[in-house]
Image: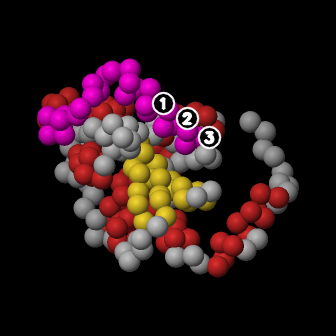
Amino acid sequence: MKHITFYLDFLSPYAYLAFEHLPEALKGVSYSVSYTPVLFAGMLKHHGQLGPAEIAPKRDWTYRHVLWLAHSQSIPLQMPASHPFNPLPLLRLALACAPEAEPGAPNRYVCETVFRHAWRGGADAADAQRLASLVQQLAPRRDLQGEEVKAQLKTNTDDAIAQGVFGVPSFRVDDKLFWGLDSLPMLRDYLLDEPWFAGPDWTAVRQLPSGVTRRR
């Protein structure tokens, strides 16, 4: 049985859709999952990138696209009252609920509850009263504002970057990294031992020369 590390940020609608679609996408496959909250903004800063919501035309397209994807996959999704929102309270809450045995990986119920807080109903994901109700519902075992939880989020994010993660959702299995909602069919094939993955194409792309480098 293969183990998947699922890197997510509750800010990302694609991460939400991938989270909801994962059981269906991998139906019949034997696997286990560690749900690993990371700070997407930290990855963007590390790689010197803007987020999709920071580029106006891309922002509009992203929201249209995720609404269509949700419709086409029959996944309930309503845009929150504002986006992007600050995901730190939600990320820290999820980690504060993680078990002692795996402090960087809250269980699926916790992640599902937090994702649906943000992406169902159209309310403000960062509203203080709603956050307080969410905390009461999940009853975290650790202090959300404690240094232990803050350090865990930084560790998760730094470890993800060290593994080559540059965006969410991302899935790591063995030494392979899969990025995006649309990588789920590819992930499924890998878990089913599709022979293509033993061929040269996976690693050969690293040796492909770049014909031009854009100045920044």
Residue 169, horizontal then vertical, whole percent: 47, 53
In percent of width and height, residue 200 lies at 76, 71
Residue that mark 3 sits on? 162
Q: Residues within 10 Å of mark 2 (few under 14, many from 20)?
A: some
Check contact, mark 2 vs mark 3: CB within 8 A: yes
Identified by mark 3, the residue type is Ala
Secondary structure type for disc 1: helix
Rendered view: 177 above or below 92: below
Tell me residue 102's x, y (percent).
Answer: 38, 41
The residue at which mark 2 appears reads as: 158
Let me know if residue 143 is in the magenta part: yes
The amino acid beneath tag 2 is Asp
Please name the predominant secondary structure of the magenta segment in the image.
helix
Mark 1 belongs to which amino acid? Lys
N-term mark: 1 or 3: 1
Instruction: Tell me where residue 100 sits by quadrant.
Output: top left
Tell me where the magenta segment starts and ends, as one range.
134-161
The residue drawn where x is 82% and y is 60% is 208
Q: How is the image coloured?
A: secondary structure
Q: Which residue is rendered at x = 36% and y = 58% of the image? A: 19
Relative side of 202 to 105, left or right: right
Q: Residue at x 27, y 58 (%)?
A: 77
Circle 3 Cα neighbour tier, 10 Å, few/some/many (<14 / 14–19 / ≥20): few
- Please tell me whether residue 39 belongs to the stretch shown in magenta: no
Q: Tag on residue 68?
A: none
In this rendered view, identify the residue nearer to me: 55 or 18.
Answer: 18
Q: Using the image, tell me which numbered label, if any, was put on residue 154.
A: 1
